[in-house]
Amino acid sequence: MSLKGYDTIAFLSSGTPEAEAALARLSALYGNASPEGADVVVALGGDGLMLQSLHRFMGANKPIYGMNRGSVGFLMNEYHEEGLRERIAAAQSSIVRPLIMEATTVDGRKETARAINEVSLLRQSFQAAKMRISIDGTERLGELVADGVLVATPAGSTAYNLSANGPILPLDAPLMALTPISAFRPRRWRGALLPDKATVSIEILEADKRPVAAVADHFETRDVARVDIRMDHGTGLVLLHDPGHSLDERILREQFGY
């Protein structure tokens, strides 16, 4: 049966007992193609597996439809085994663009990684981090003393960014959220909303005394001296959600607390 071009499905499991049981049942019902050759990937797990799947197929233009076999499942659809092909064919697509993190360590090593949710800079020791923040080459904050700071995408604005009291962004907003984490100085700085074409540069002050790690989703680089962050407009990741439960709708609901 061909529906909307989704002839072959690849199932991925998070490895939990619930996800593995679902994998066995769904494979028996619909078959299980290789992920690289499938028309659509169905991720069985929680938001962690969805992020892993999006990273794995970044640049492959492969739509991913998640079904919740984890805990929160903000990025996932409800789990139902019946009529899966019809659900996928009727699903609404959301395009998510990642951030690019370019980090330089104290010893001169360079690391590049992408983040779907956020790039966060976090203190590595008992001492607060000291950071200088520039936007497009212009210094905007000479010294931020804090546990850290993060830059979030609209898709990631409801994750760590929201926990740090950052703003929730509509999915199609051409913005990034720059949010401090437990700021000590300046006390009243609550962050900034930036155009998604901006480049955020963060220099670590007293890096030897106050070491800082940079984290792009699950990829961590320790002892950084400088981090540059920008949106990757050339990469679009496709998430599929059931009608009425799109990522746009979920983010909107978060703004009203339900």
Image (tube, grey):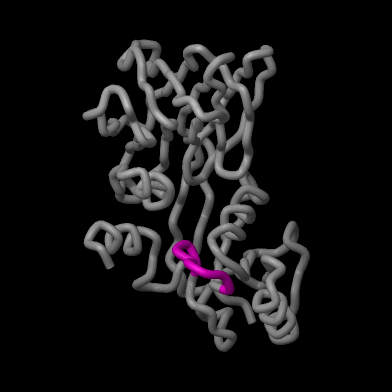
The residue that appears at 58% across and 57% down in the rendered structure is 48
The residue that appears at 27% across and 23% down in the rendered structure is 186
Q: Is residue 144 above or below residue 81?
A: above
| Magenta segment includes 73 | yes
Span colored in magenta: 69-76
Residue 208, how many percent across, how many down?
Answer: 58, 14
Prevailing SS of the magenta stretch:
loop
170 or 33, nearer to the observer: 170
Q: Is residue 60 above or below residue 208?
A: below
Can you see residue 39? yes
Residue 64, how many percent across, how many down?
Answer: 57, 61
Furthest residue in direction front, as rendered? 126
79 or 125, nearer to the observer: 125
220 or 10, nearer to the observer: 220
**In-image side of 18 versus 209 (left or right):** right
The residue that appears at 43% across and 19% down in the rendered structure is 130
Residue 29, how many percent across, how many down?
Answer: 70, 86
In which image quadrant can residue 133 be found? top left
Which quarter of the image is occupied by the C terminus? bottom left
Can you see residue 10? no
Residue 52, how many percent across, how many down?
Answer: 63, 53
The residue that appears at 57% across and 53% down in the rendered structure is 51
In which image quadrant can residue 213 be found? top right
